[in-house]
Image (cartoon, helix red, strand yellow):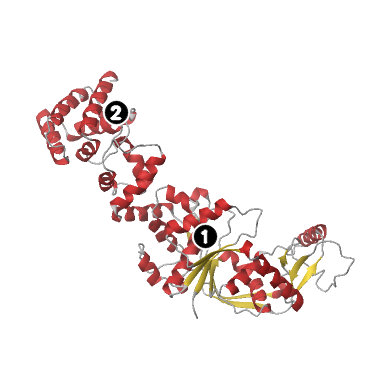
């Protein structure tokens, strides 16, 4: 059997973690088995679907590197096909018109709730013969078997059995003729030769209903695999406070796509104790039989740890390009500072995200107008200004502005003045960056540059003298 998977997002919102992991699992399974993945946009909910969301979903997939092989296919362009299938089910007697009013259905459900029953349609129109006296626009319901059970083998959850008495006659076409989800996915999966339906466990309840439609239409069933839900580290439903952002928001946070994919694959799947996987390793090792049915915990701290791993090992030119995008979005020009690739090399081991890197290097490209008051309290005293003046003279005399030469000057002054290294290095950091959170002082001054360093020392020395 040729493997064909599908990723069918609904464009009623941006692509979030759960959808991204579903896309990843489908993509990996197709790649591992020499198959293909279909991208399908399930946009029949016209009231909530939006072109902005479609573009966001496509951009998210491209950023993650999850290239689809067919599509994107849009359900709104297949309405005639769905209408034809509804007519076929009606002709076969596997579907029927339901003329029940909204008021009747609301009353029915309220009475069922009061009796402690599960709200469900009671089959009132199941055997009714439409007549000329019917003037309202009916919905179309699928005629669900009344006896027996529906069973399927789930590649993640094992054998799943559902009594048909638990299922009611679901609506497959609304009063305006528009098809509903459970019908369209069956028709699409059959027409697109989908062999494996890999989706979230929230769709388990839909599967028996869809199996009935598959069988009524004479379609071969795909293999079903329902992956666990993602929850926060506290075991609660994943929310914004846990980091439940859209995929593109993670990009804007400075997360690398390979880091996000690496964390997503570990949400419900594992290979021993291995934490870091290259894309090639993911494809080689991924197996649906190793996906757990237990909920998976998203951990922002773990994602940042993985992200740092990839930052340290990524091409500096690529990282510089991404950091440049962040800096430009903030209106920070990079023309009057050091080469960004050099900065990346120095900073990559010190940060966990590219936004953190951008935050920590702004002083290299912008003037320093404020100083950390706590840093001043901790490291600036009455002698600081005079020490900075000595350092300035030493630095000004350097022929070569290199980290090594800068380091030698500072260490010589430390020895000559009989002070500890931090008594000079920390005030210098404050002077050129505004804080003490910088790389080694020689690397920091090298990146700031000769002229900026000397100018900032002058400015800071005056400030320190004036405010002591």
As helix, strand or loop, the secondary structure at mark 2 comes to helix
According to the image, label 2 marks what residue?
376
Left/right placement of residue 425 relative to residue 267 reads left
Q: Is the residue marked by circle 1 packed among few (<14), some (14-19), or many (20+) residues within 10 Å?
A: many
Occupied quadrant, residue 277: bottom left
Q: Earlier in the sequence, mark 2 or mark 1?
A: 1
Q: Residue 409's quadrant in the figure?
A: top left
Q: Residues within 10 Å of mark 2 (few under 14, many from 20)?
A: many
Residue furthest out toward the top: 466
Q: Secondary structure at mark 1?
A: helix
Q: Nearer the viewer, residue 212 or 158?
A: 212
Measured as percent of width and height from the top left, residue 330 is found at 41, 38
Do the numbered discs 2 and 1 sit on residues whose CB atoms are within 8 Å?
A: no
User: Real-space Cα distance between discs 2 and 1?
Assistant: 48 Å
Q: Residue at 36% x, 54% y: name it.
A: 307
- Residue 457 at x, y percent in the picture: 23, 27
Residue drawn at x 26%, y 29% as measured from the top left:
431
- x and y percentages locating residue 137 in the rendered image: 81, 62
**Front-most of 375 and 50?**
50
Extreme residue in the right direction: 133
What residue is at 78 percent from the left and 59 percent from the top? 114
Q: Is residue 268 left or right of residue 11?
A: left
Please, is residue 264 above or below residue 332 in the view?
below
**As drawn, 421 above or below 312:** above
Judge whether residue 237 can be spotted in this image.
Answer: no
- Residue for badge 1: 19
């Amino acid at each position: 059997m040729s493997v064909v998977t599908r990723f069918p997002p609904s464009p009623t919102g941006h692509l979030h973690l759960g959808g991204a992991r579903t896309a990843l699992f489908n993509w990996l399974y197709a790649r591992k088995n020499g198959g293909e993945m279909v991208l399908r946009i399930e946009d029949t909910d016209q009231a909530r679907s939006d072109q902005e969301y479609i573009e966001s979903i496509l951009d998210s997939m491209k950023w993650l590197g999850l290239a689809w092989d067919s599509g994107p296919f849009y359900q709104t362009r297949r309405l005639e096909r769905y209408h034809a299938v509804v007519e076929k089910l009606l002709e076969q007697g596997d579907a029927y018109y339901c003329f029940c009013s909204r008021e009747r259905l609301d009353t029915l459900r309220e009475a069922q709730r009061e009796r402690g029953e599960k709200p469900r349609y009671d089959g009132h129109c199941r055997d009714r013969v439409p007549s000329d006296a019917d003037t309202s626009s009916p919905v179309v319901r699928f005629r669900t078997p009344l006896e027996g059970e529906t069973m399927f083998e789930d590649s993640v959850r094992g054998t799943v059995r559902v009594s048909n008495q638990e299922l009611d006659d679901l609506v497959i076409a609304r009063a305006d003729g528009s098809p509903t989800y459970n019908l369209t996915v069956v028709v699409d999966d059959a027409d697109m030769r989908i062999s494996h339906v890999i989706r979230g466990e929230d769709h388990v309840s839909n599967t028996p209903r869809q199996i009935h439609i598959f069988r009524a239409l004479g379609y071969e069933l795909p293999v079903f695999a329902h992956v666990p839900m993602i929850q926060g580290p506290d075991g609660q439903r994943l929310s914004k406070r846990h980091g439940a952002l859209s995929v593109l928001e993670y990009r804007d946070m400075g997360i690398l796509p390979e880091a996000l994919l690496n964390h997503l694959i570990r949400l419900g799947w594992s290979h021993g104790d291995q934490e870091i996987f290259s894309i090639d390793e993911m494809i080689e090792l991924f197996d649906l039989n190793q996906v757990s049915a237990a909920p998976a915990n998203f951990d922002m701290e773990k994602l940042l740890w993985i992200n740092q791993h990839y930052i340290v090992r990524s091409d500096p030119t690529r990282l510089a390009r991404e950091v440049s995008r962040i800096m430009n979005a903030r209106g920070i020009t990079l023309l009057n500072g050091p080469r960004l690739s050099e900065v990346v090399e120095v900073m990559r081991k010190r940060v966990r995200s590219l936004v953190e890197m951008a935050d920590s290097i702004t002083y290299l490209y912008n003037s320093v107008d404020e100083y950390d008051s706590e840093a001043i309290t901790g490291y600036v005293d009455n002698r600081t200004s005079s020490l900075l003046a000595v350092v300035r003279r030493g630095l000004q005399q350097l022929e070569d502005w290199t980290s090594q030469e800068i380091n030698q000057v500072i260490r010589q002054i430390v020895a000559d003045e009989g002070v500890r290294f931090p008594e000079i290095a920390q005030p210098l950091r404050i002077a050129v960056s505004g804080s003490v959170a910088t790389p080694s002082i020689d690397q920091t001054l090298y990146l700031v540059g000769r002229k900026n360093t000397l100018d900032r020392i002058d400015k800071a020395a005056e400030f320190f003298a004036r405010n002591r």
